[in-house]
Image (tube, helix red, strand yellow):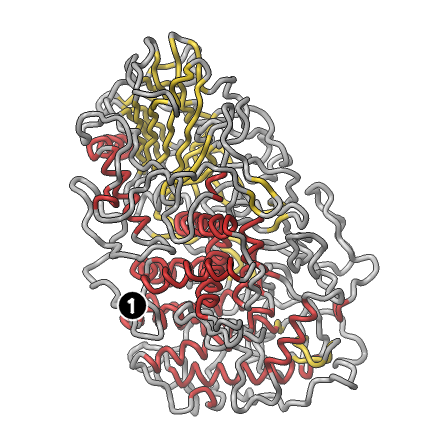
């Protein structure tokens, strides 16, 4: 996330401060304006297909040709995403010189296809039918009507799982033809074959879906994640080409399989015409290091034949091993260099109807090449079936099975937690079992149809879309480095996102982690512990390199609050208190709390921030959403510790403030403060907020006086005389301390952040001092005040001085009203916006779903977005991506919110009243105010 622009006080836009994008160019800096870094608006974004696993990403598959434009891996030593890209083919539409996500600064060129499936007959090219130099072949975009073709509650289709692409490597048996059921089917599941009638015309809302035609490839995904094309071949009317890209679960590599199969209506399998051969062209471009944007690595010598392994190897240039890619055909036939030396090609023998190429990745060429050999030994069928089983065991709409079954012979364990810790035990009620959750989600889709929220095709499309976005978030917001197998958390592994290859704590923990937690608790634990170890060295910093060092400085309170909130959610979902004994968790939590408490203000009891959830400078130092999130996070963690035998003091929710010692580990920054009017508080009168006595803050340091004691953290046990600290003796978090700080912060929010509004008291967005001084009315999707309901802050406490739910209702009404200059624009895909991008936000959709806005289910089913994947914003009229394509952490947030909405819908009473929160989703401890 990058900046949003300067919101205006009191719901008005000051003359001369409106900022309009101008084709991505820098805008004049007005006097007193904060400095912003914002994304370009994209007039058009070409469609893509996507797949990957935790070690390798294929983020830019061409739907029109089934070509891979790049292969990405993660490097710890480079602290970046490393990409092997195709030879450039000219300027990519919609991006400026070096400012777009798909090109390096100053290159002005977009990569062409790196790996191109081809079919030839007697030297004549049959596929692709036109030169593959462009981003779209003459055949046009692939038909993707499969999004509307899956029955509610059925496995994603249409799909022919291992149907084919079954050319044999050493690990395969004899080559087979015709459909082949997956191993999941053998285990008792429905075969993942094409459902009868799945290619019938469908209409989603008012937008008819593209349907298969003689000239357009048909693209669908096996189990929602393994892309497969069916292509009509000019000159071979009785045959079709099947291309499948697979990134096998648990493997450091990928594979592509080509298979010729009889066209529909051709009768018995005819003999293959003479002279037909299948191949994979390799057109190497540059190796790039991607941190936000691509930058080519100098000195690249390109691929070279590795004769010992019969592979084609390509190392990233440099004196230190960073990354390598190696390709090998299943049969081990050596690659041929093309005339002119610009590329390479792997070919099947003439007359063979099946062909597979394996790709291995490692820090250097030897490891990459031998990994490709290993994949060939395991074989296509076992790799595909194991991957489909792994996905099916975590499918959000299927009864989830044990995801830790042993791998097939010769395979690596897909994702095994380190050490010998036993799997996380299922949490008792109110958490729901995976089987029950899947049933509720299917029932929620059916109820949405019955209520008229979705049509039957839209319900099927939504199921498919949520499944695919769940996998996208799982594999593109998390990954493992080649040189250490270390977990890293990042905004996106796709270079199409404008700040890819870097860590944002908010994005990873508040948005992506909930989807991971409800999908695979064991994996969630491993990732969470790794995150505490890697990213709490500089807690709350704006953006970090993959190794946790500071990339883009700036303190953000909501990012610090994400740590205790995420820990509380994990404890509530799993009951696994052993995570608290992890040294990284204990030390990391202490560092987070120290950094936040060092910025607590003496006069208000509020905690200051430097940047907003949008990553822009705060209009005033005390942001309501941030402080409410921090208060709720501490309260939730204290409650979780009490529930799971980590008792808090009796009545911990009402505990008095517990002071801490001196401030520690504060960056030398002063939050930007606006020039305050003569009257420092809101005008009194009808609807004015009641006077509330500020919470006591004795002994708490002001955020304006940072400590020079860098790197310190609260010690266990007693602090200065008469004080307590965040940790108990032994290093565990002190529930009483957490509860006391939560109560203090909540009282401070209600005392100073409630101001008069259009319909009565409402929350200010930010204040500059006591009593609502310098209050700013504003809201932004990355941290909307609407989330205070589902996160639990709006739930009334016995000692609340006002009706918090009513205050929040007034606030949300203002957010969606014409009084908000960044309220929803006109259009079928409208949501609240903000200056960062004046287009509807997917984050607003997620927040609305969590808050009970059921109409957003239809929004998600109908909006094209970014080839069906979550993006930052869309066009209000068309639903097409406008900024931030391939936004992986956002995909997790949207999917989790939609799944929670479906569960809640299924639990709703028949008359639509008394909706109950789906237990265990971790949205917070209270009900929405909506």
- Identify the residue position indicated by label 1 in the image: 582
- Quarter of the rendering occupied by the C terminus: bottom right
- Left or right? Give the position of 292 relative to 768: left
Q: Residue at x 51, y 29 (%)?
A: 111
Q: Residue at x 33, y 58 (%)?
A: 520
Q: Position of residue 875 (x, y in %)?
A: 65, 47
Q: Which image quadrant is residue 403 in? A: bottom left
- Left or right? Give the position of 527 relative to 601: left
Q: Is residue 371 visible?
A: no
Q: Is residue 454 visible?
A: yes
Q: Considering depth in this image, is 715 or 604 the residue closer to the camera?
A: 604
From the viewer's perspective, is residue 73 above or below residue 771?
A: above
From the viewer's perspective, is residue 226 above or below residue 843?
A: above
Q: Residue furthest left?
A: 409
Q: Which image quadrant is residue 75 in? A: top left
Circle 1 crowding by C-alpha within 10 Å: few under 14, some 14–19, many from 20? some
- Quarter of the rendering occupied by the N terminus: bottom right
Q: Secondary structure at mark 1?
A: loop
Q: Position of residue 753 (x, y in %)?
A: 65, 79
Q: Considering depth in this image, is 573 or 860 the residue closer to the camera?
A: 860
From the viewer's perspective, is residue 337 above or below residue 29?
A: above
Q: Position of residue 410 (x, y in %)?
A: 17, 39
- Left or right? Give the position of 781 relative to 219: right
Q: Considering depth in this image, is 331 or 206 the residue closer to the camera?
A: 206
């Amino acid at each position: 996330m990058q900046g949003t622009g300067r919101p205006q006080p009191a719901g008005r836009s000051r003359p001369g401060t409106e900022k309009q994008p101008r084709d991505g160019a820098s805008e004049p800096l007005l006097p007193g304006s904060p400095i912003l870094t914002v994304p370009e608006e994209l007039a058009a974004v070409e469609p893509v297909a996507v797949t990957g696993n935790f070690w390798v990403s294929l983020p830019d598959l061409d739907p029109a040709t089934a070509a891979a434009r790049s292969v990405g891996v993660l490097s710890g030593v480079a602290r970046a995403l490393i990409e092997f890209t195709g030879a450039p083919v000219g300027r990519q539409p919609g991006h400026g010189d070096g400012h777009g996500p798909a090109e390096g600064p100053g290159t002005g060129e977009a990569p062409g296809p790196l790996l191109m499936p081809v079919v030839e007959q007697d030297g004549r090219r049959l596929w692709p039918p036109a030169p593959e130099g462009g981003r779209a072949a003459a055949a046009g975009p692939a038909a993707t009507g499969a999004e509307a073709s899956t029955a509610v509650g059925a496995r994603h289709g249409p799909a022919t799982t291992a149907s084919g692409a079954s050319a044999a490597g050493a690990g395969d048996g004899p080559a087979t033809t015709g459909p082949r059921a997956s191993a999941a089917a053998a285990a008792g599941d429905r075969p993942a074959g094409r459902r009868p009638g799945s290619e019938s015309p469908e209409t989603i809302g008012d937008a008819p879906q593209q349907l298969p035609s003689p000239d357009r490839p048909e693209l669908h995904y096996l189990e929602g994640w393994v892309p497969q094309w069916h292509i009509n071949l000019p000159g071979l009317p009785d045959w079709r080409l099947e291309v499948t890209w697979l990134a096998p679960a648990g493997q450091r590599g990928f594979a592509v399989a080509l298979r010729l199969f009889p066209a529909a209506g051709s009768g018995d399998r005819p003999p293959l015409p003479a002279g037909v051969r299948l191949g994979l062209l390799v057109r190497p471009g540059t190796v790039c290091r991607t941190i936000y944007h691509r930058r080519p690595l100098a000195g690249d010598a390109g691929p070279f034949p590795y004769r010992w392994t019969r592979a084609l190897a390509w190392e990233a240039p440099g004196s230190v091993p960073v990354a390598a890619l190696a390709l090998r055909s299943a049969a081990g036939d050596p690659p041929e260099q093309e005339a002119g030396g610009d590329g390479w090609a792997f070919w099947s023998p003439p007359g063979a109807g099946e062909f597979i190429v394996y790709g291995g990745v490692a820090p250097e060429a030897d490891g990459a090449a031998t990994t490709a050999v290993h994949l060939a030994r395991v074989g296509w069928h076992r790799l595909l079936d194991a991957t489909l089983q792994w996905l099916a065991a975590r499918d959000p709409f299927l009864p989830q099975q044990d995801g830790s079954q042993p791998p097939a012979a010769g395979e690596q364990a897909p994702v095994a937690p380190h050490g010998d810790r036993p799997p996380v035990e299922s949490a008792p009620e109110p958490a729901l079992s995976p089987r029950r959750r899947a049933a509720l989600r299917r029932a929620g889709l059916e109820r949405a149809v019955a209520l008229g929220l979705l049509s039957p095709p839209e319900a099927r499309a939504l199921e498919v879309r949520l499944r695919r976005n769940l996998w996208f978030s799982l594999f593109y917001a998390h990954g493992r480095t080649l040189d250490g197998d270390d977990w890293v958390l990042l905004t996106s592994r796709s270079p199409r996102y404008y700040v890819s290859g870097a860590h944002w704590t908010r994005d990873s923990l508040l948005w992506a982690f909930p989807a991971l937690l409800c999908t695979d608790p064991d994996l969630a634990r491993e990732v969470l512990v790794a995150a505490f170890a890697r990213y709490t060295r500089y807690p709350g910093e704006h953006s970090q390199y993959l190794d946790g060092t500071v990339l883009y400085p700036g303190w953000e309170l909501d990012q610090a609050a994400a740590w205790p909130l995420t820990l509380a959610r994990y404890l509530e979902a799993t009951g696994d208190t052993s995570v608290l004994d992890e040294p990284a968790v204990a030390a990391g939590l202490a560092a987070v709390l120290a950094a936040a408490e060092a910025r607590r203000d003496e006069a208000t009891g509020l905690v200051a921030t430097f940047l907003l959830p949008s990553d822009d400078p705060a209009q005033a130092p005390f942001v309501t959403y941030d402080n409410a999130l921090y208060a709720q996070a501490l309260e939730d963690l204290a409650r979780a510790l009490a529930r799971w035998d980590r008792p808090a003091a009796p009545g911990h929710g009402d505990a008095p403030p517990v002071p801490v010692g001196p401030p520690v580990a504060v960056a030398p920054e002063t939050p930007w403060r606006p020039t305050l009017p003569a009257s420092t508080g809101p005008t009194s009168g009808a609807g004015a907020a009641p006077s509330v006595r500020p919470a006591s803050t004795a002994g708490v340091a002001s955020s304006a006086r940072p400590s020079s004691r860098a790197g310190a953290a609260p010690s266990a046990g007693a602090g200065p005389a008469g004080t307590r600290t965040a940790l108990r003796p032994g290093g565990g978090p002190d529930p009483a301390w957490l509860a006391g700080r939560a109560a203090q912060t909540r009282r401070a929010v209600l005392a100073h952040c409630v101001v008069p509004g259009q319909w009565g008291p409402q929350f200010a967005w930010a204040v500059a001092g006591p009593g609502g001084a310098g209050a700013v009315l504003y809201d932004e999707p990355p941290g909307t005040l609407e989330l205070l309901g589902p996160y639990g802050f709006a739930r009334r406490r016995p000692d609340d001085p006002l009706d918090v739910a009513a205050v929040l209702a007034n606030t949300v009404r203002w957010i969606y009203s014409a009084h908000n200059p960044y309220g929803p624009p006109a259009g079928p895909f409208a949501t609240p916006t903000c200056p960062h991008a004046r287009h509807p936000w997917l984050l607003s959709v997620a927040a609305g779903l969590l808050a009970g806005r059921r109409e957003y289910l239809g929004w998600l089913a109908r909006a094209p977005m970014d080839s069906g994947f979550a993006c930052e914003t869309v066009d209000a009229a068309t639903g097409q991506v406008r900024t931030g394509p391939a936004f992986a952490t956002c995909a997790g947030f949207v999917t989790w919110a939609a799944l929670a909405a479906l569960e809640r819908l299924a639990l709703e009473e028949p008359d639509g009243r008394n909706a109950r929160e789906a237990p265990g989703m971790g949205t917070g401890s209270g009900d929405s105010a909506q």
